Image (tube, grey):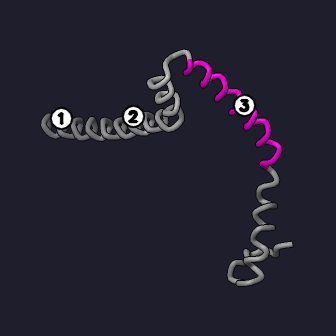
Amino acid sequence: MAIILLLLATNRATQIFRYNLAMWLMTIRGILFTRGDRIVVGSVLGPESLAIYAIVSDVASGINFLVAQPIQPFLPVVSRLALLPVAEADPKWLPHRKLT
């Protein structure tokens, strides 16, 4: 009985380890994707240039966020308007409700 419990515990530990490894790799990938540019700038140009780059990049991201927020509600409307010529040419592209 103890051997079965040990095998079950080992199997569970392996599952937990694999899951955590996958999550860790996804986190590392996310960091590299979002901050990879800063790693390159810092290693090539040095810490002073990296500081300037980081400040300018953060300000630009903030401006982008502020400008994009009021536009977000209009994206479904723009998508529907963009679909109209396609739907007129080929009716199979028509959604279940009418495009007007």
Closest to the observer: 69 or 40?
A: 40
Q: Residue furthest front?
A: 45
Given contact means CB atoms under 8 Å apart, are the residues at marks 3 and 1 in contact? no
The type of residue carrying mark 3 is Gly
Closest to the observer: 75 or 3?
A: 75
Closest to the observer: 40 or 28?
A: 40
Q: Is residue 71 above or below residue 56?
A: below
Q: Residue, x 74% and y 79% (percent of image)?
A: 87
Q: Earlier in the sequence, mark 2 or mark 1?
A: 1
Given contact means CB atoms under 8 Å apart, are the residues at marks 3 and 2 in contact? no
Q: Is residue 93 magenta?
A: no
x, y (%) of residue 21? 34, 36
Q: Magenta region: which residues?
A: 49-72
Tell me the SS state at disc 3: helix
What residue is disc 2 on?
24
The type of residue carrying mark 2 is Trp
x, y (%) of residue 55? 65, 22
Which quarter of the figure has residue 22? top left
- In the picture, which quadrant includes the C terminus? bottom right
What residue is disc 1 on?
6
Q: CA distance from mark 3 to mark 1?
A: 53 Å
Q: Residues within 10 Å of mark 1 (few under 14, many from 20)?
A: few
Q: Residue, x 68% and y 33% (percent of image)?
A: 61
Which of discs 2 and 1 lies nearer the camera? The answer is: 2
Image-based side of 83 in relation to 6, left or right:
right
Q: Earlier in the sequence, mark 3 or mark 1?
A: 1
Q: Is residue 59 magenta?
A: yes
x, y (%) of residue 10? 21, 36
